[in-house]
Image: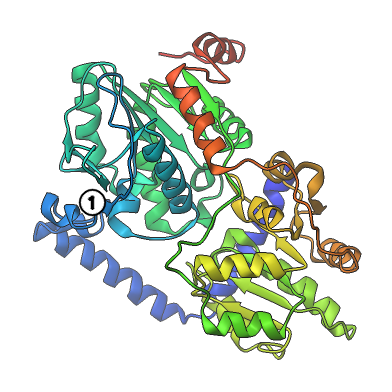
Amino acid sequence: MKQKAKIEAFLREELGRERRQEHPLLIYLKSKAQEFFWTLSRILGLSHWHDGQWRTPDPQQAAALRSDLSGDIPPPAPTRRLFIDMTATHRYQKHTGVQRVVREIARVCVTSGSAIPIFIEDGRIFSHFRHENLPEEFDLASGDRIFLLDSGWGSWREYLKLIAQVRAVNATLIGCLYDIIPLLYPAAVEEANCAAFHQWFAHVLSQCDAIICISKSVALDYLAHLQESPVPDLRTRQLGWFSLGADFEAKKNITPTPIVEEFIKNKPIFFLSVGTIEPRKAYPIALAAFEKLWAQGDERIYVIVGRAGWNTTTLQKLIKSHPEYGRKLYWFADANDADLRLFYQQAQALVFPSFAEGFGMPLVEALYYGASVIASDIPVFREVGGEDVCYFSLLDAGSLQKQILAIGGIAKKHTRPDLVSWPQSAAQLVEMINHERYQINQQQWADHFKQRDLSIN
């Protein structure tokens, strides 16, 4: 509770600073304009622009985004097929953390024949990959399993038809939970995304037969939330978690950008942060720590790699107008995977100041490429990083400053810790689903809630 209060105070301060940059009249006018847009779009039958449906379903348009797969792969199993939903990644072609997970798991599973990556379109199920051994479209059958690996909350209504199909043929639906940050810290999430996640959580995840989380910490957060706020008609009775991989590689056709290659050549030693510029990443804490060092004449370089995110306009302006920008402070908003690999390989250490994460892939990716890691002292980082990470007190710039000083003289590692690869991650996931080897089975689930005087349906 003490940590949560500290986080909420940080959010109030940061979001308040953001709002103070806008004139109250402008805030009011923007709010009224949004209300007018929502009302008019509903009258015109265009509410799908903002109510969680990305566009009018169009199988032909969606088919154009399918990926060609070369080489020999096993054909799908005739029965008890495992489908991996990657609809959002298929549609939007984004490259954030969730999409990295989806693409890596999908690639491993389709080449091994252990699962079939799919996308849904108007209730129909299509293969994401185009290959002679893969049918273009699938009909669900009894015994099939669908794992909702992707971030589908932006189009949650479209999954209601899929749920009905699953029930009609006696298939199994398994949800994936990356985190419950929108439930724990709604102020840290963009309003539209927060609202969509609440709907996804209530109407889709609640109807899954099992839930698989990307860390034990997320699973424990989920159980604690259900204890405090029981979900009506909850169907889930099994809960598990698995580890994500650390060994990402840039695609062969992607090369580092010239500006990054030039930077690496001229700035061989630096500290690095990776992630979208958004409130929960707590970049102001890292920046404050380096400012303390620079004020003392320290020459350490701080590099931020991540796209511009929501509700951080003031922070973005602060970074770009900073006296040390372009000398000791750098921000690369459009780095590709090849760039990111170079940054990891050359960084002295990753600085990870987030106050909330579901896993924290930059942590394991940095360790994989030989960088040290300084991270917030939160449960999921302890779970994922263990003794291979240096921790600083949550949202404490002074504590972070001390860790930066302590780690500054440590040579880069030439051996990496024992980390999970993406093939191992996918194998762990498939094994759990195929044999129903969830860490919390149906009886343990029932016992957990009975001990807390909570009823389950």
Color encoding of the figure: rainbow
* Residue 152 placement, left or right of 341: left
Quadrant the N terminus occupies? top right
Residue occupying image coordinates x 53% and y 65%: 276
Residue occupying image coordinates x 15% and y 64%: 40
The local secondary structure at tag 1 comes to loop
Residue 311 image offset from top left, x and y in percent: 50, 69
Residue 5 image offset from top left, x and y in percent: 69, 49
Question: Circle 1 sits on which residue?
Answer: 53
Quadrant the C terminus occupies? top left
Residue 27 image offset from top left, x and y in percent: 41, 75
Q: Is residue 413 above or below residue 246?
A: below
Q: Quadrant of residue 324?
A: bottom right
* Residue 181 placement, left or right of 78: right
In front here: 122 or 104?
104
Residue 32 image offset from top left, x and y in percent: 29, 70
* Residue 281 placement, left or right of 204: right
Is residue 52 in view from this perspective?
Answer: yes
Q: Is residue 253 above or below residue 191?
A: below
Q: Is residue 281 above or below residue 339?
A: above
Is residue 15 in view from this perspective?
Answer: no
Q: Quadrant of residue 392?
A: bottom right
Q: Residue furthest front?
A: 72
Residue occupying image coordinates x 34% and y 74%: 30
